[in-house]
Amino acid sequence: MFSKACEYGIRAAIFIALQSLQGRRVSLKSIAAEINSPEAFTAKILQQLVRSGLVESLRGPGGGFSIPGDRIAQIRLSEIVYAIDGDKLYEGCGLGLEQCDARYPCPLHDKFVEVRRDLRNMLEQTSLDELLTGLEVGLTYLRR
Amino acid sequence: MFSKACEYGIRAAIFIALQSLQGRRVSLKSIAAEINSPEAFTAKILQQLVRSGLVESLRGPGGGFSIPGDRIAQIRLSEIVYAIDGDKLYEGCGLGLEQCDARYPCPLHDKFVEVRRDLRNMLEQTSLDELLTGLEVGLTYLRR
DNA sequence: TTAATTTCGGATATTTTTGTCCGAAATTAA
DNA sequence: TTAATTTCGGACAAAAATATCCGAAATTAA
């Protein structure tokens, strides 16, 4: 469903948010260790999130990545997915037709649009901070 | 959402079904021309559908691909997707965790499971023949 | 039988995605 | 200032997905 890059990006963002709540900046190394992702590849994805303004970074000793407290409740998964994969998930015909819309739909158009809208709604309605509560109380996990 | 292979596979199956209804077998060449797909690649995908028993093939002059009439109403999109992509779409954690289930869920587990169930239901409930009616009356399209 | 047609199957090529390496730049602290 | 740390950015490598090529096998018809 999501690309590997997206999976790593979301997991990283969740972990950064979790640590930012405690006022801790986290290094690339600790992120990759915590979410169990390839370090160098994760670096590329984090750079995309930084450029998109979803994550802040600081170089040098004690540096690392963070998300400002007020942003943690604002940022939606849809923004993270969009920053990494662009509108791939939101646009385009389910059967790959170049032109496919309500006027000239593919045979699957209506049903596909509905499913994708559900996915999109889910991503747009899910903020980072609501994913943290389960982690904090040990009900959900970021690795394994 | 779907792989290119799946997109071609579904479009091909729809076109074969449409022609089979008229008692016509269709060649690889005409399929690729009709659904606007790369011919040799489409051949590989058709072979998968044949091996899975979703499509019948016949070699030699006048040969080609077909779907028996009674199968057209039985075959679901879920079967086509499964024949081509396996259970990739139906299994696995949304965030890519190796172990993620109701007992040890990732932070997105519940929401993701719900969206994927919607997608799966849609594919399981959609049969080939119901996609043909729109095509027959010119309401939907397979190319463009 | 021969020639033409069409799918089958393996090898190969191209493109995209995923992943690695390494030096440069920035920052901190001794 | 110097050394250590950490992100940044570009080049490169590996793997997977997409796509092509071509001869073999099967079938049909002349």
Image: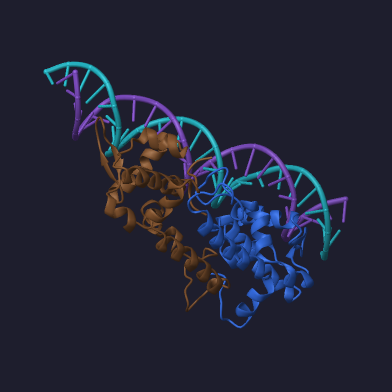
Chain colours: A brown, B blue, C purple, D cyan
Above or below, A33 against B1 in this view is: above
Residue in the image at 69% along x and 61% along y: B79
Residue B58: quadrant of the picture: bottom right
**Residue A131 point in image, percent of width and height:** 43, 53
Above or below, B60 against B125 in this view is: above
Q: Residue furthest bottom?
A: B137
Residue in the image at 41% along x and 34% along y: A39
Above or below, B49 against D14 in this view is: below
**Residue B137 point in image, percent of width and height:** 61, 83
Total label count? 0
Is A52 situated left or right of B134 in this image? left
Q: Residue furthest front?
A: A137
Q: Is residue B25 visible?
A: no
**Residue A138 point in image, percent of width and height:** 48, 45
Q: Nearer the viewer, residue D23 or A138?
A: A138
Q: Nearer the viewer, residue B122 or B132?
A: B122
Q: Nearer the viewer, residue B69 or A127?
A: A127
Residue in the image at 33% along x and 35% along y: A27
Q: Is residue B57 visible?
A: yes
